[in-house]
Image (spheres, rainbow, N blue to C red):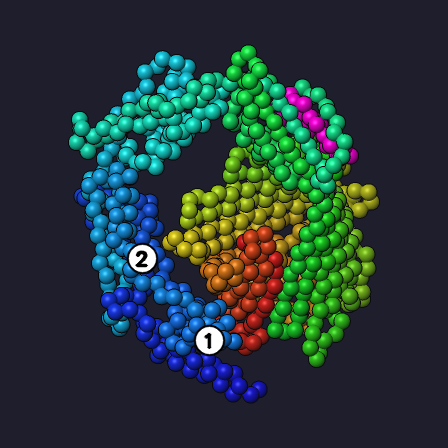
Amino acid sequence: MNRWPHILSIFAVATILLIMAACSTTRRIPEGEYLYTGLKGVDVVNYSDTTKLSRSMKEVLTAAVDVAPNKKMWHLFPVGLWVYNNWNVTDSTKGWKRRWYDNMVQEPVLVSDVRPQQRVKMLDQIMANNGYFRGVANYELVESKKNHKKASILYTVHPGPEYLIDSVKMIPDSTHLIHVIDSMAQLDSYLKPGVRFCMDSLSAARTRISNGVRNRGYYFFRPEYIEYLADSFYTRQRIDIHLDLASNTPKYALQRYRTGKVTMDVYRHAGGGEPDTIELKRLTLVQYKPSRLRTATIEDNVTFRPGKWISQRDINNTQSYLSRLGIFEGLNIEAVPDTTAKEPTVNINMAATFDMPLEVSLEGNVSSKSNSYLGPGLAVGVTNHNVFGGGEQLNVTLTGSYEWQTGHNSSSLFNSYEVGLTGSLYFPRLLAPKFMKGKRRYVNYTRLTLNADLLNRPHYFKMAQFNTSISYDWFPSKYVSNSWTPLKFTYTNLMHTTEAFDSIMAANQAIALSFQSQFIPQMIYTFTYNMDIDYSNTFNWTFTVQEAGNVVWAIYRLAGKKTGEMNLFGTPFSQFVKGSTQIVWGHRLGRTNQWLVSRVAVGAAHAYGNSSQVPYAEQFYCGGANSVRAFTARSIGPGSYHVPYAKGQYFDQTGTFKFEANVEYRFPIYGPLNGAIFLDAGNVWLLKKDDARPGGLLQGKTFFKDLATGTGVGLRFDIGMLVLRGDLGIGIHAPYDTGKSGYYNMTSFGSSLAFHLAIGYPF
């Protein structure tokens, strides 16, 4: 292969970059000005060893002065600034040069544009607002040693002592409103002696008090009607806080209102229709027909009660409950005073418009490896969000994937396909026992699923799988979700086999048993904890445990059958336990949009009783777009076992124990285009020894050697609703014998490459 064109291309690019770097980026900087190169830092000189500025305060101060300099391509060279300084473009310049100039040019960010003097004043104000009244800040320019027209800015902060709240004095208790304000203030977590004085925290406390007041009938009360008086006269470095009502508080804000008439108008998506007025217990519903709507669903999700004290919480909850049904594209709630009522009353007027009931989704992924194997997949889904008029969702998804070999030596030997059809019906409520209690503020689902799947491996086998299940998804808290499937009934039928496949199965009884036709009656539970810990850290933990066949086995035992294989409808049923867990932790680097995301996943499965092997479909595999990306799916393991693809036995690359670990650095490139650098490791093993797959057994002494590892780079086109991802994996270590010694044992760099195109992030 002639490498000269490739070498010349690299040399040409390097030459262009050197020429650009040699050209000045400060040639047009005015005399006495500096090109701003960024924030040098914010140095904090603490008042004492016991009075130190908190990390969060440092971040706030840094964010106030952290102005971005001119952008650099690939974080290396400021192309737009170079164009500004070195392209000779005037007002009379026309044509392509002018268009390129306008698209690429970036005017220099000068130190004077940053206005460090003003930012010093901002730092002083921020410190004063946060209880550091003696705080002083200043700045200095740090000139570049290579170019004296460039400079960064270093800020120095002397926060001084912190001022603490000494006492909180309430308003004299004279009315019900003032009693409520005082009660809320006494319960507030911030308004306590010994807490550092902070204007933002005081404002937040005032908002919390106002919200509490509004939830007790004073709907028109606002935070600005509460005033604070801060007094530091009596005690050194201490603040006395006095609460009071603002003198300009309007009379209507001091009144307590009851809920009057509640009315809801529901409009058709296409508009028009005939109004039909329905009097319900809690509200009057005006539905424009023809349209599909269960009145009980509306009444269940409206929390207003006529005659009850008006509450902002009821408005927020009703808005949330109705919106989460997913059947309205627009929802508006208004509280209007009733001037004809004998006592202060507020009528509630709601208006909602149906959304389009049907939604179509399309997902795809493609995997490519340098050994000429391709594997695309496609999923097409149609969802009706309002099947019975109460937010019930019917989803039908058709999935398909195809794998084939390309190149001069391609054949149909490895060509295979898989096609599946899944129908799911979601009810936005728990049709379940009372012990599953979810918070009403979240949507809790009952899910019915029916699925059929056909897997065809030409020259080997054709397998069909059918399953049906009922599941419950509920949320006991903001961060926790549960999913319980009390019954998932699966039937696997090995429809057709070839002589080649039969000969392989005859030589490996363990694999043969995992492929046999069988029933799999299962119970599955999944626990998920998902939390944004703070601005810079996210955490997700998922744990799944499932069992199969134990209930049926227990019934047989109670019926008196103690020995021998047990059948269900004339077919053996599988009996096993399986568990898996995954932890994903994301950490933002500084205040940038750069993330370091790590993942660890472990799984194990064990067959017993009526089965000696875990079904093939329930075993683990490694590799692919969301796993170890330097290897294609089912191309590694178990352990150090490996069969050349020429023999076609890729279907035995599964195991009953799995471990994977990934680290990915994600960073923005330009606009919606983001990049990634990753490192993956993982494999699958057997928990039972299989002589036909030597090296597949999980053993501590060979665990790390058996880990397949790879690195790589990726691009993500993220537009929010959709993430299109491309990853190029580079193999570092294969767990099997490649004929090469050392940890890096890939036969060649070219053969170690694998490309994956997928939808969404890998984890």
Q: In which quarter of the image is the N terminus?
A: bottom right
Q: Residue at x 31, y 53 (%)?
A: 65
Q: Where is residue 555 in the image (x, y as percent from the top left)?
A: 73, 34
Above or below for 557 versus 594: above
Whether residue 50 can be seen here: no
Of discs 2 and 1, which sits in the foreground? 1
Residue 415, by quadrant, is bottom right
**What distance separates the C-alpha of mark 2 from that of mark 1?**
31 Å
Residue 1 seen from this side: yes
Q: Which amino acid does label 1 sit on?
A: Thr
Q: What stretch is highlighted in magenta?
A: 282-304
CB of mark 2 within 8 Å of CB of mark 1?
A: no
Query: Magenta stretch containing residue 728, yes or no?
Result: no
Mark 1 sits on what residue? 93
Q: Position of residue 611 (x, y in %)?
A: 70, 48
For residue 291: magenta?
A: yes
Q: Position of residue 347 (x, y in %)?
A: 58, 22
Residue 740 % position (x, y): 52, 76
Secondary structure at badge 2 equals helix
**Which amino acid is tagged 2?**
Val
The residue labelled by disc 2 is 114
Judging depth in this view, the residue of 491 and 281 nearest the camera is: 281
Q: Is 106 above or below relative to 282?
A: below
Q: Which of 684 and 10 is in front in this view?
A: 10
- Helix, strand or loop at disc 1? loop
